[in-house]
Amino acid sequence: MHKVEKNIHEIVGEVQDGATILVGGFGLCGIPELAIEAIRQKGIKDLTVVSNNCGVDDWGLGLLLANKQIKKMIASYVGENKTFEQQFLSGELEVELTPQGTLAERIRAGGAGIPAFYTATGVGTLIAEGKPVKEFDGKEYIEERAIVGDYAFVKAWKADKLGNLVYRKTARNFNPIIATAGKITIAEVEEIVEVGELNPDEIHTPAVFVQHVILGEGYEKKIEKRTLKVEEAIG
Amino acid sequence: MSVKERIVKRAVKEIGNGMNVNLGIGMPTLVANEIPSDYQVLLQSENGLLGIGPYPDESEVDPDLINAGKETVTAVPGASFFDSAESFAMIRGGHIDVAILGGMEVSEKGDLANWMIPGKMVKGMGGAMDLVQGAKRVIVIMEHVSKYGESKIKKECTLPLTGKKVVHRLITELAVFDFTEKGMVLIELASGVSIEDIREKTEADFLVSENLIKYA
């Protein structure tokens, strides 16, 4: 079945206040720009957002934060955002900090039908508080629960009309696992090709995980830290 | 040599030819510049790249190609891209030979604190907690004392931990310590530094190796 949709606003219009949404990207790299803007325009409130970061003040998920649409954020690093700090300190925003690998595995597990798993990450730290501990082969591990979302928004490079996805370079990041963990997954892409044009050996996300494909135009792809080669050595 | 240079030049000796290495954000990133050019080393970036190359020139800048510090980078020949779950399978599964990370405090038991200062805005731990548990060797590099002159090498960490008993080796501008079953052991001294200097500037208790060596 072809899954290409014309209008991101129609799909986003189905998202209810209070929904849990998973959002791909690392920093500003590989974020679903169109979906974030559509959610902002629609004004959906009280969202629980699962994403590695929370954008910057004026871009990415920072836009939803500035618009006070996020009730709870599950992320591994949120240090690039002043609005975040203000809302967190005032108690408006609930935050669940999760180690990056644990976050990735919680999402992967969610998409793979595994309700929980054990990891050594966070043992003996604040992260372990309240979590069941189990010993395997003489080493301690903590239990971590899977994450699934009502909606998953991902950004890919190319899709075919069935929803098979290919990502580009490090814009892949959390996107493939997030695509597996949404009850409804919406992929926005830079190019849509005919069925059969993608090499099956090179597909990162098989079509089964994707419900809707949107062709995006005019991606800004903002760069957080434009760092260039310098001639001199350190010091 | 600046303090930073001294630490970085010592730290690069932890990297052997053929290793897969993760360098943390900040001072550890500088270690990359010192890796001998004839070494085949693959640098891992948590966001999904094995084989980080130099920073790009203007024409090479690609918003889809960044490192874990969100800086634009390039990829070396032989590099690979992967998703975040696979990236941390690499880390947690013990496939990374060495992780070199910055530190705020290290305890004599090898506990590390490097992600949070109570009372200040919490930014998050990113991948640090996974790295300290998963990498085969965890090397911490940091200045020996804080800007207030206090020892950053503690009997017990005062800051929230990133990991408990996770540090294998600690490198400062003054000394190198290993963490062993017997405790923390001073194994190297920077040139011009005495054991007494170290005792004075180190809150933690430590043993002195019989094979204590000096480095430049």
Image: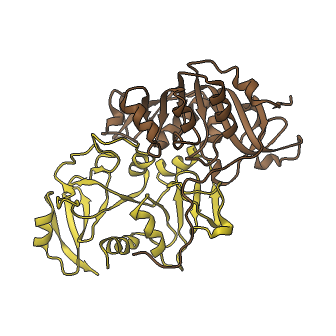
Chain colours: A brown, B yellow
The image quarter containing residue A12 is: top right
Residue A143 visible in image: no
Q: Is residue A89 above or below residue A216?
A: above
- At horizontal 45% and vertical 48% (from top left) the residue drawn is B127
- At horizontal 65% and vertical 21% (from top left) the residue drawn is A15
From the image, which quarter does the N terminus of chain B lie in? bottom left
- At horizontal 32% and vertical 45% (from top left) the residue drawn is B116
In the image, A151 versus B169, the foreground residue is A151
In the image, A76 versus A101, the foreground residue is A76
Q: Is residue B205 left or right of residue A108?
A: left
The image quarter containing residue A21 is: top right
Q: Could you tell me residue A136's position as x and y percent? A: 38, 37
Q: Is residue A232 left or right of residue A184?
A: left
- At horizontal 52% and vertical 33% (from top left) the residue drawn is A65
In the image, B135 versus A185, the foreground residue is A185
How many numbered marks are there?
0
Q: Could you tell me residue B182's position as x and y percent? A: 18, 57
From the image, which quarter does the C terminus of chain B lie in? bottom left
Residue B187 visible in image: yes
Q: Could you tell me residue B42's position as x and y percent? A: 55, 65
